[in-house]
Amino acid sequence: MLRLPSRPSRVRRLGAVSAVAAALGVAALTGCAGQVPMHPAEDANNPACADVIVRLPDTVAEQKKRTTNAQATGAWGEEAAVQLVCGIEPSGPTTDTCVNVNGVDWVIDESSAPIYRFEAYGRSPGLAVYVDGEQVSGTDVVVDLSAVAKELPQERKCTSLGDTLDLTKPQA
């Protein structure tokens, strides 16, 4: 079962992303021969994940939706170039890049490029999307999935150093 830690260390994240990369490889071998083999997240039975899954688009980054064999998951593309998992433990603060796309903060883990992990930051339950950057654009993926990510309650937002400094006071 794919378990994504709440505050993953770089080594544990590499292991989790490697597992997803292996799943993408298995999916590539299966082509369009049926369901994409995936593992549900620990909190996959959360009702908020059901709200996300019923709203998944038929296409993401111009890739057609595939069926999966696990609760609260989604996949798109002949080789499952995009895989979504709802119900992960939300990550805590990180120094990874965070971008806001259509009102959703996405943290980008590039440590296993060309497989990129995008997490809808500050949402609970957590939502992670794995993208094979050799097949599709991660930007296109998060644009297409931001509307469904908004279904998850937002508890935190990404901030930058500028957000935490009081620039009205004279600096020493």
Image (cartoon, rainbow, N blue to C red):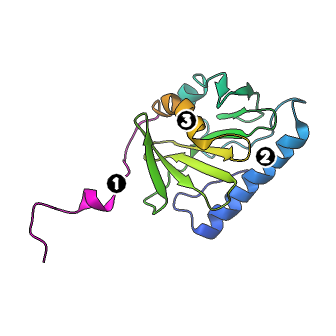
Q: Which residue is drawn at 75% across and 52% down?
A: 21
Closest to the camera, between mark 3 and mark 2, is 2
Q: Which labelled disc corresponds to residue 27?
A: none
- For label 2, the SS is helix
Mark 3, residue position: 46
State the residue at coordinates (25%, 60%).
164
Q: Which is more N-terminal, label 2 or label 3?
A: 2
Q: Residue at x 68, y 47 (%)?
A: 133
- Amino acid on which the number 3 mark rests in the picture: Asn
Residue at mark 1: 159
Q: In this view, does 94 lie to the left or right of 35?
A: left
Name the residue carrying label 2: 24
- Image quadrant in which the C terminus is located: bottom left
Measured as percent of width and height from the top left, residue 62 is found at 68, 27
Under circle 3, the secondary element is: loop
Gap in Å between the C-alphas at discs 1 and 3?
27 Å
Is 54 on the left-hand or right-hand side of 158? right
Magenta stretch: residue 170 in it? yes
Q: What residue type is labelled 2?
A: Leu
